[in-house]
Image (tube, rainbow, N blue to C red):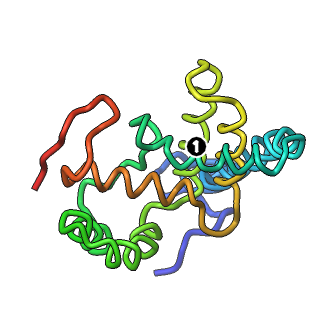
Amino acid sequence: MSAIGRNERCPCGSGRKAKRCCGARRGPSEAELAKAFLAIQSRVAARRVARRTLEEVRESFDAMLDLPGRHLCLQVPLPRLLPPEIEALRYAIDEDDDDRTDELVDRALVRVDTPVQRAALARAVLDLADAGTVDRAIADVTIVDLDSRRSSAFMRMSLLHAVSVSVGASRTPSGLLVVAR
């Protein structure tokens, strides 16, 4: 069975052409919107980062890596049904196997690192910076890191903290110890 053409009548029975009814998907996708949002925010943040010394940027980068451990909203939400890559990472963290954890984190990251997720984390960082909870310089470095086309150090730490909390290997930012087996 072939797909319905844009100029054919919509199968819903409305009598309208598919391009003007149910078959029409208008505008950019959620992922495209997320990429655009992050690109805009990154340009603004990059201008502020460029005014800082290299040492200030390094300090902000190091502080950025601690953010997911201090703010639960900056941890990647794990899927309800864990894919094998994340389950393997959970096991390695639970067994305190650092070598295996380093080996598995990139594979697990592929399952949760999406433009939509990066934009959600960027919004959370910006909200914390606007509230004065996170220093603006740290937020700027985080936004630039999240907009990187390759691997993001912040996404990596966000996933590691989320998985660590899920197996009870570390506490939530509020001090709770979660035990979920």
Q: Nearer the viewer, residue 24 or 151?
A: 151
Q: Circle 1 sits on which residue?
A: 63
166 sits to left or right of 47? left
Residue found at x 47% / y 55%: 157
Residue found at x 84% / y 41%: 52
Q: In which quadrant of the rendered view does residue 63 lie?
A: top right
The amino acid on which the numbered mark 1 sits, given as a three-letter code, is Ala
Residue 141's spot in the image, x, y percent? 70, 46
The residue positioned farthest toward the top in the image shown: 131
Q: Nearer the viewer, residue 181 or 38?
A: 181
Q: Quarter holding the C terminus?
A: bottom left
Residue 33's spot in the image, x, y percent? 68, 48
Residue 73 in the image: above or below residue 43: above
Residue found at x 45% / y 43%: 68
Element under disc 1:
helix
Residue 135 in the image: above or below residue 19: above
Residue 107 in the image: above or below residue 53: below
Q: Residues within 10 Å of mark 1 (few under 14, many from 20)?
A: some
The residue positioned farthest toward the front in the image shown: 55
Residue 145's spot in the image, x, y percent? 67, 54
